Image (cartoon, rainbow, N blue to C red):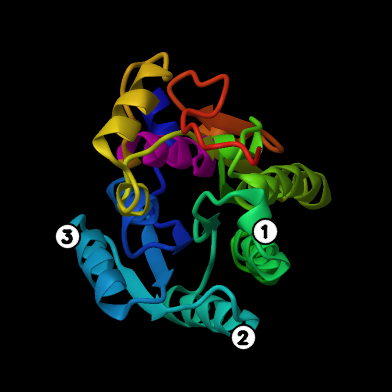
Amino acid sequence: MILDHFKLTDKVAIVTGAGRGIGEAIAVAYAEAGAHVAVGARTQDQIDDTAEQVRARGTRALAVQTDVMYEDQLERLVDATLEEFGRIDIVVNNAGGSPPKAALETTTKEFDTAFRFNVSTAFALTRIAVPRIVETAGEGAVVNISSSAGRHNGPGFAAYGTAKSALSFLTKELAQDFAPKVRVNAIAVGSTLTQALESFLTDEMREAMIATTPMARLGTVEDIAACALYLASPAASYVTGEIYGVNGGLTSLSAAMPRAF
């Protein structure tokens, strides 16, 4: 049955930024497909809630408080996952983000932080986890959550867009390094309704974003989770080094920000 290829029965996944939004949705989707999930994020009560949702789907969960900006905490996340489950099959580098900000108002420190949060942390966790994937499971998958802002240029996204573009390119590089044992792919997320987006989204901005999206709606976290499930599953066993756009057909950024001059 073709649907069997989308199952993750008894696979073990690590999902960062899993306390809410896209990370939470991916963790739950993986559980529904049969995976056990280690969920990591900074806020303990949020990952506890996600872990409970995983368990409610009939699989096991582990909540590990993790700030991805600290490599020792990433190492602890991997070690705790191995201690609890004995293997790792999938890593989802979802933690990241940076609000839009005019280039001339963005400090060098803020630029560096955006790069580190969105790129360096994903590299660090992947570098730590991939050898353990090969040792314990033989093969596996890494899914990076990138952005349409890394594909399309627009004012206000110098830091975030550059970082996500680098994450997408890193995805392609690591796919070459780790083939054929570990597949590495990314999702270029479009305008998706999450708590992070809602924090600065006005009704006027929402209408404008919908108007510039061919599918005439904002994305949902389930839209992203469905693609993340495909990329982690045997259904994508011949797919690596790809950046999948889940963005409603965007060919430019949907958020219009003011120019410098």
Magenta segment: 222-234
Q: Quadrant of residue 63?
A: bottom left
Vertical placement of 12 versus 145: above or below? Answer: below
* Between marks 2 and 3 in the image, the one whose residue lies nearer the viewer: 2
Magenta stretch mostly in which secondary structure?
helix
Vertical placement of 88 versus 9: above or below? Answer: below
Instruction: Give the position of the C terminus as an image quadrant.
Output: top right
Between 183 and 159, the one nearer to me in the picture = 159
Q: Position of residue 115 (x, y in %)?
A: 68, 60
Q: Amino acid at mark 3?
A: Ala
Residue at which label 1 appears: 119
Q: Amino acid at mark 1?
A: Val
Instruction: Give the position of the N terminus as an image quadrant.
Output: top left
Residue at which label 3 appears: 56
Between 230 and 234, the one nearer to me in the picture = 230
Q: Say whether residue 1 is visible.
A: no
Q: Residues within 10 Å of mark 1 (few under 14, many from 20)?
A: many
Q: Earlier in the sequence, mark 2 or mark 3?
A: 3
Q: Is residue 204 left or right of residue 99?
A: left
Whole-number angstrom distance, CA of label 1 to CA of label 3: 32 Å
